[in-house]
Image (spheres, grey):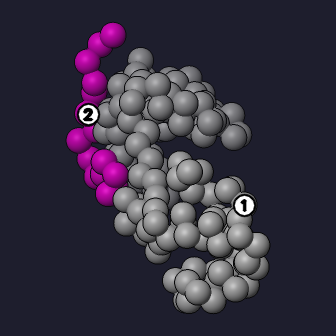
Amino acid sequence: MNACIEWKGAKDTKGYGRRTIKQKNYAAHRVAWEAVNGMIPKGLGVCHCCDNPACINVEHLFLGDQSVNMLDCSHKGRLHTVRGEKNGKAKLTDDDVRAIRQLWDFGFSVAYIARRFGARTSASWIGTIARRKAWTHIT
């Protein structure tokens, strides 16, 4: 495979090249793909096998939907999900989740459990956690 061809123009915050054509902004790698291969079918994106968002080398590009792109990302070990209390947006701790499930298993209602945890989260989310549909990594 040839080396990456780096887009030298403007880039977005994620490092993808941006190209303005007739006052409309486009992703440079998509413009490169279409220049060589024609229109991109509806529902597909242009993915990078080189994982370099600024690359416009069409030999490094392939078509795929979002699931293909995420599968490619996962196979390359780049898909890192931060779960539970390690997620910066988490409002509960792992111990909170254990307590919610213990209260649920003892027969307390979702409404009661939600009141115990106050405004940190909603009653519907408490129910999802209690039924083990979320925070599945916690036993």
90 sits left or right of 37 in the view: left
- Tell me if label 2 and label 1 are in contact, CB under 8 Å: no
Name the main secondary structure of what is drawn in magenta.
loop
Q: Is the residue 101 above or below the residue 53 in the image?
A: below
Given the image, on which type of amino acid does mark 1 rest?
Arg
Observer-side mark, 2 or 1, equals 1
First of labels 2, 1 by sequence position: 2
User: Toward the viewer: 118 or 69?
Assistant: 118
Q: Which region shows up in magenta? A: 1-15
Disc sitting over residue 6 in the figure = 2
Numbered disc total: 2
Is 12 within the magenta?
yes
Q: Residue at x 65, y 72 (%)?
A: 103
97 relative position to 76: left or right: right
Q: Nearer the viewer, residue 112 or 60?
A: 112
Where residue 35 appears, as percent x and y from the top left, is 50, 29
Vertical arrangement, residue 111 with respect to residue 9, above or below: below
Write the residue at 50% across / 28% down: 72
Amino acid type assigned to the residue bearing label 2 in the image:
Glu
Q: Residue at x 62, y 58 (%)?
A: 134
- Is 51 inside the magenta-drawn segment? no
Q: Is residue 135 above or below residue 81?
A: below
Seen in the picture, residue 94 relative to 21 is either above or below; the reply is below
Residue occupying image coordinates x 72% and y 61%? 131
Q: Which mark is residue 131?
A: 1
Residue 112: image x %, image y %?
Answer: 70, 86
**Side of 101 where 76 appears, left or right:** left
